[in-house]
Image: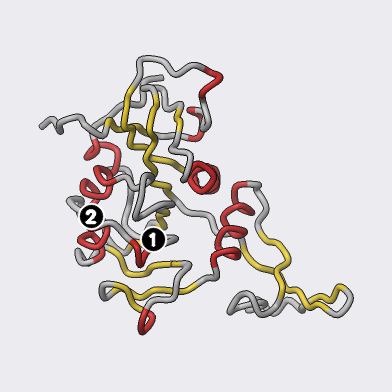
Amino acid sequence: MDKLVTASAAVSSIPSGSTLVLPDPGGAGFPGRLVTALGTVPAEGFTVICPGAPRAAEGLRKWLGSGQITRLIVDSEAPGGRLEGVEAEFVPPALLKQRLQASAAGTPTFLGSVGTHERPAEDGTRAMFFGDDEFAPVPALTPDFALVRAVQGDPKGNLVFADEVREAVLSVARAAHRTLAEIGTLLPVLHPRLVQLPARHVQSVVEAAAKERG
């Protein structure tokens, strides 16, 4: 099935209150076209999981100032707990990665070492001990939408990513309920041996250099 649409059409399916994830906000994985299009829709109240947010691209910083985002989850501490005026919750990098990977694996929770996260057992669950080390349940983090950028892809949604962001992008794309992908070079067909993220994980694809229609 052909999933190629305009950026505006791709983001139109994102409702208010959604949790989004941007795996590489300051580098090769940043989907600038999708972020720009999202800034024009009436939806708001987004929570955005944004590893590396303090290094964010200018396009993301403008989006943070739009008022659409009410909360950030970041892996670097933001001064005063805010970034560009938006509330920012700090989660240690390794823990944020684990929480997304747990979701990708279909695991709703996992045991984390007490002290590596701020809310070890807020549901009242008791911590567990293995030897002298204390552990407590940590919930997986499941975004509603992942917004990613691929270096190559085809209209069906098969994708290839830049080497430096491949691991991070694959993790969030599999963790999210739906993935919207911006493609640098759109090919008629991507050879099966090159596919890093199969089309079944992707809802819509957008050609990065394409002009918006209508």
Q: Is residue 26 above or below residue 174?
A: below
Farthest left residue?
214
Among the 4 quarters of the image, the one containing residue 182: top left
Among the 4 quarters of the image, the one containing residue 140: bottom right
Question: Residue 171 versus residue 202: which sits nearer the camera?
Answer: 171
> In this rendering, would 10 be left or right of 73?
left
Rendered-image quadrant of the N terminus: top left
Earlier sequence position, callout 1 versus callout 2: 1
Farthest right residue?
131
From the viewer's perspective, is the residue at label 1 or at label 2 nearer?
2
Q: Is residue 49 visible?
A: no
Element under label 1?
strand
> In this rendering, would 129 be left or right of 148?
right
Check disc 1: other Cα within 10 Å, few if <14, some if 14-19, many if 20+: many
Q: Which residue is mark 1?
A: 48
Question: Residue 14 versus residue 25: which sits nearer the camera?
Answer: 25
Q: Which residue is mark 2?
A: 59
The CA distance from mark 1 to mark 2 is: 14 Å
Farthest bottom residue?
80
Q: Is residue 79 visible?
A: yes
Which percent across, then down, holds residue 104? 60, 47
Which percent across, then down, holds residue 58? 23, 58
Which percent across, then down, holds residue 110? 71, 62
Q: Residue at x 70, y 69 (%)?
A: 112
Check disc 2: other Cα within 10 Å, few if <14, some if 14-19, many if 20+: some
Element under label 2?
helix
